[in-house]
Amino acid sequence: MSAPKPRVAVVFGGRSSEHAISCVTAGSVLAAIDPEAYDVVPIGIATDGRWVLESGDTSRLTLDDPEKLPEVDGGRVGVALERVTTGTDLVVSEAADAPRTLGEVDVVFPLLHGPWGEDGTIQGMLEMAGVRYVGAGVLASAVGMDKAYMKVVLVAAGLPVLPWVTVTTREWQRDAGSVRERVAALGYPVFVKPARAGSSMGISKVHHADELDAAIAEAQRHDPKVLVEVSAEGAREIECGVLESFDGPPESSLPAEIRIGGDHEFYDFAAKYLPEEHTELDVPADLDDATTEEVRALAARTFEAVSCEGLARVDFFLMPDGSLVVNELNTMPGFTPLSMFPRMWAATGLDYPALVDRLIRLALARDTGLR
C-alpha cells in the first residue's frame, strides 16, 4: 500500500479587519494545492472567532464585488484541534451528534492576515498543539505584525528605517500635546497608521498639524497603538520576496515596483486590492543590477534579523538619492496569483503551484517546538 498523503489544514478568515483578504488568499491557495499530493481540509475562522469546517468551493472566496466581501460561513459545523497520543487530530462537533474525528493533521497552512492570526497568536496555539505550520514562528510573527517593535529590531540589526513616533492610547489621552510636539519634530508630511494592522487599512497621509488628530482617531479604529512616521517623499516603492531554503541561507526574489497614479496618493486599500488603470505593478522592477542585488541582500538580512521562517515580503523605499530604506516586513503577505509576492517569485522562476508546494514541504521538514 502507498503511504498516506500528508494532511494539510488550510486555515483562513479570522477576527481581524483583514478577514475578507484572508478568504481571497485561501481561495487561491486551495485551488493551487495538488490534491494528488496532499489531503486538504479547509478550516474557516468566523469573525466571532468560531472555527468551522468550510467547504472546498473556492468560487465564493473572491473579491469580484467590493460591495460584497467574501467571509467565512460561521453557521457550518464546528471543528477543533485535539492533541492525542499519536499526534493532533481534527475533531468535528455537530449539535445533534457526538464529536467525530477527521484524523491527524500533518501541517497547518495559516492564511490569516492581521491580529489574532498573523501576529503569533495562532502560531503559539499550534506550537502548544505540536503541529507543524507554514510560515514564521511566534516571535517573528509578533515582531512582523507590530510595526513599532519591528523598527526597533531592524535598527538594532543595523538596517535603515524611516524616523518614527509610537503613540499609545494612554499617552494620547494623558498628554496629546506632547505627542503633537514629537510628531512635529519629525516634520510634515507624515503617515499615520495602525501599528498592528495591514492591507493599508486605517492609514492616512497627514500634510499639516491640523490633520493629525483625525488621522490618529482613524488609525485607532483599527488598533489602539499607532505609528507615525516620516513620509518618504519622492521615493519609489520596491518590494522583494524572501523564501527559507531547505539547507542554506534564505533566497530572495527579483524585486518589483508599485507605481501609484490618479487619485491615489499612496498604496491604499483600493489601489492594492481593486486595481484601476492608475496602479502599475512592474514585475520585475526597472532597476540597475547593483540596486537589484542590494535590494535582494537587504531583504534576506531583514528576514534573518526578525528570525523569520517560511516566507516574507520585505518592502522598501528607494529614496531620491539612491539609498534604500526598509519600510516593513510581512510574514504572511498577500498570496493570490495576482499579489506581488507570488508574482515576484514567478518572475524569478518559481510559479504559483510550485511556490505553495515548497512552503508546505518546508513546514513538513522542520521540527516542532524550540528550534
Image (tube, helix red, strand yellow):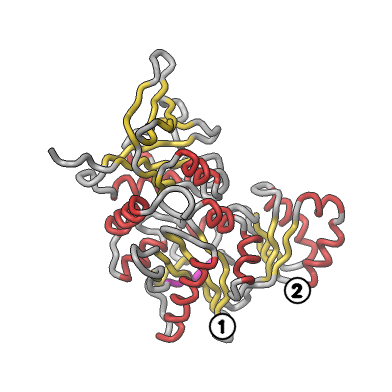
Residue holding disc 1 = 323
At mark 2, the secondary structure is: loop
Q: Nearer the viewer, residue 33 or 264?
A: 33
> In this picture, is 233 found above or below 147?
below
Question: Left of 157 or right of it: where is 12?
Answer: left
Residue holding disc 2 = 187
Q: Is residue 306 visible?
A: yes
> In this picture, is 139 found above or below 79?
below
- Quadrant of the drawing holding the N terminus: top left
Q: Which amino acid type is shown beneath numbered disc 1?
A: Ser
Number of other residues with Cα within 10 Å of mark 2, as a class: few under 14, some 14 to 19, many 20 or more: some
Magenta residues, start to end: 256-262
At mark 1, the secondary structure is: loop
Magenta span includes 105? no
Magenta span includes 260? yes
Q: Residue at x 40, y 31 (%)?
A: 84
**Which mark is drawn over residue 101?**
none
- Residue 234 spot, x, y in % from top left: 59, 78
- Can you tell which quarter of the image residue 96 is in? top left
Q: Which amino acid type is shown beneath numbered disc 2?
A: Gly
Q: Earlier in the sequence, mark 1 or mark 2?
A: 2
